[in-house]
Image (spheres, rainbow, N blue to C red):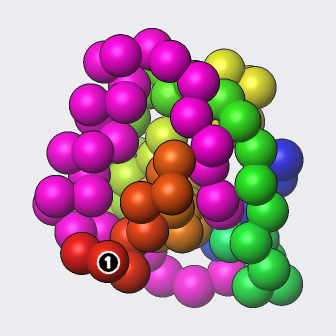
């Protein structure tokens, strides 16, 4: 899954970030909803392998080999970013 980054990075809620870190620590596959460049949400199942910051934005690496900017994530295992 490749996502575009057409807009400036918007930091995500700290509690949602903590949730991502918890899933990364568990190393279990999760269902991830990611907003693509057209605004549609695409879903995949993967293990979060890393969370890191680079060039003023935060990213998540997944077991699929894909990297996603954190503000493109809509939900993790049914927990929506918009709920925070």
Farthest front residue in view: 78
Is disc 1 surrounded by few (<14), some (14 to 19) or many (20+) residues within 10 Å?
A: few
In terms of image quadrants, where is residue 70? bottom left
- Tell me the residue at 22%/69% (across/down): 13
- Tell me the residue at 42%/60% (across/down): 79
Residue placed most toward the observer, 51 or 44: 44
Residue at the disc numbered 1: 83
Q: Is residue 33 magenta?
A: yes
Whether residue 67 appears in this view of the structure is yes
In terms of image quadrants, where is residue 30? top right
Query: In the rendered view, would you say 40 is above or below 63?
Result: below
- Give residue 23's position: percent from left, percent from top: 37, 30
- Give residue 69's position: percent from left, percent from top: 53, 57
Q: Is residue 12 left or right of residue 75?
A: left
Total marks in image: 1
- Tell me the residue at 48%/82% (across/down): 8
Chain part drawn in magenta: 6-34
Query: In the rendered view, would you say 5 is above or below 30?
Result: below
Residue placed most toward the observer, 35 or 53: 35
- Give residue 40's position: percent from left, percent from top: 80, 80
Residue placed most toward the observer, 12 or 84: 84
Q: Is residue 63 left or right of residue 72?
A: right
- Tell me the residue at 75%/26% (across/down): 64
Query: In the rendered view, would you say 81 is above or below 23?
Result: below
Q: Is residue 18 magenta?
A: yes
Whether residue 61 appears in this view of the structure is no
Q: Is residue 74 left or right of residue 82?
A: right
Query: In the rendered view, would you say 56 is above or below 22?
Result: below
In terms of secondary structure, where does tag 1 sit? helix
């Amino acid at each position: 899954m490749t996502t575009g980054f057409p807009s400036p990075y918007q930091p995500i809620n700290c509690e949602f970030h903590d949730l991502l870190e918890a899933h990364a620590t568990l190393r279990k596959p999760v269902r991830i909803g990611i907003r693509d460049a057209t605004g549609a949400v695409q879903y995949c199942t993967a293990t979060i392998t890393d969370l890191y910051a680079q060039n003023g934005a935060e990213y998540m690496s997944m077991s699929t080999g894909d990297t996603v900017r954190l503000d493109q994530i809509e939900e993790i295992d049914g927990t929506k970013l918009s709920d925070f």
